[in-house]
Image (cartoon, grey):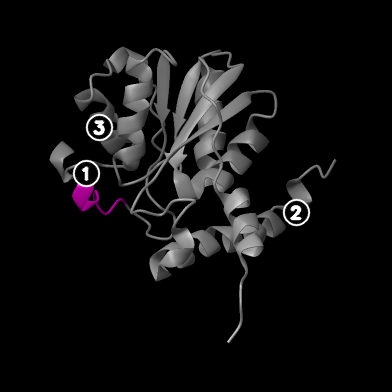
Amino acid sequence: MYCLDQKQIEDITNYIFLEDSLKKADVIFIPGCERPEHAEEAAELYRKGYAGYLIPSGAFPKVRGEFQGVSPEGEKYGNHFSCEADFLEAVLLKNNVPSSAILKEREATYTLENAEKTKILLDERNFCVSRAILCCKAHHARRAYLYYSMVFPDVEILVHPVVVDGISKDSWYKSREGRHTVLGELSRMGQQLLMMEEKINWR
């Protein structure tokens, strides 16, 4: 039997789970997902005046090859969507965000593409961003921040996490699902950065 002490758990927790103090921003980034929670929170931030535009991004997970529908938690918004961004847009609209405030990206199939294709969308519209709020699942915060900050190096990105499935910084290590989810994030980041090694400026 091995022992992972509290400091080691805290080291993993502090790396994976990010959260910044909120400030008014130009846009809210919403990475693709079949769940509604982080889009619902993004709508709340919009209603509170934290940003004037929201960018839901996503087609479907690359490993699945197609959009296979929304989660049970999202079915109250409907279940006939062509992609993640269409679903997230519906969540925003049902939560009192006007369509004029939504800039939708419908092609990304993984987190890095969420960032890359969001940047293309903004560049095509000559939309200048100096500060953005990244509204994402709590356990996805580090990886989402990593990629969005790599693609938007000159933008101040504030991470605003939303706890999903009870996988939080306080409890992730107490359940098998939480451990597999968080440690899976840790593993994927290393593997994906190694795949991108030759394209990264390691300054």
- Whether residue 31 is visible to the viewer of this picture, yes or no, is no
Q: Which residue is mark 2?
A: 197
Report if the CB atoms under discs 1 and 3 are less than 8 Å apart. yes
Q: Residue at x 65, y 56 (%)?
A: 11
In the image, residue 22 sits, relative to residue 172, either above or below, namely above
Q: Quadrant of the N terminus?
A: bottom right
Q: Is residue 40 above or below residue 25?
A: below
State the image coordinates of residue 184 (x, y, percent, origin top left).
Answer: 52, 63
Q: Earlier in the sequence, mark 1 or mark 3?
A: 1
- Residue at figure coordinates x 57%, y 47% from the top left: 143
Q: Is residue 200 above or below residue 97?
A: below
In this view of the protein, which residue sits in the foreground, 126 or 128?
128
Nearer the camera: disc 1 or disc 2: 1
How crowded is the residue under tag 3: few (<14 C-alpha within 10 Å), some, or many (20+)? Answer: many
Please say if the residues under marks 3 and 2 sit with CB atoms less than 8 Å apart: no
In the rendered image, the residue lying farthest to the right is 203
Q: What amino acid type should be assigned to the residue bearing mark 1? A: Gly
Looking at the rendering, which quadrant does residue 88 occupy?
top left
Q: Amino acid at mark 2?
A: Glu
Determine whether the residue tagged by mark 3 lies in a helix, strand or loop: helix
Residue occupied by mark 1: 74
Residue assigned mark 3: 91
Q: Residue 85: horizontal and vertical position, in percent?
A: 34, 36
Specify which label sits upstream in the sequence, 1 or 2.
1
Q: Could you give the CA–CA distance between mark 3 and mark 2, rounded to whole angstroms?
A: 36 Å
In this view of the protein, which residue sits in the foreground, 65 or 139?
139
**Left or right placement of residue 76 versus residue 107 in this view:** left
Determine whether, in the image, residue 187 is placed left or right of residue 109. Answer: right
At 30% across and 32% down in the image, what residue appears? 40
Disc 1 from disc 3: Cα separation: 8 Å
The answer to which of 34 and 5 lies nearer the viewer is: 5
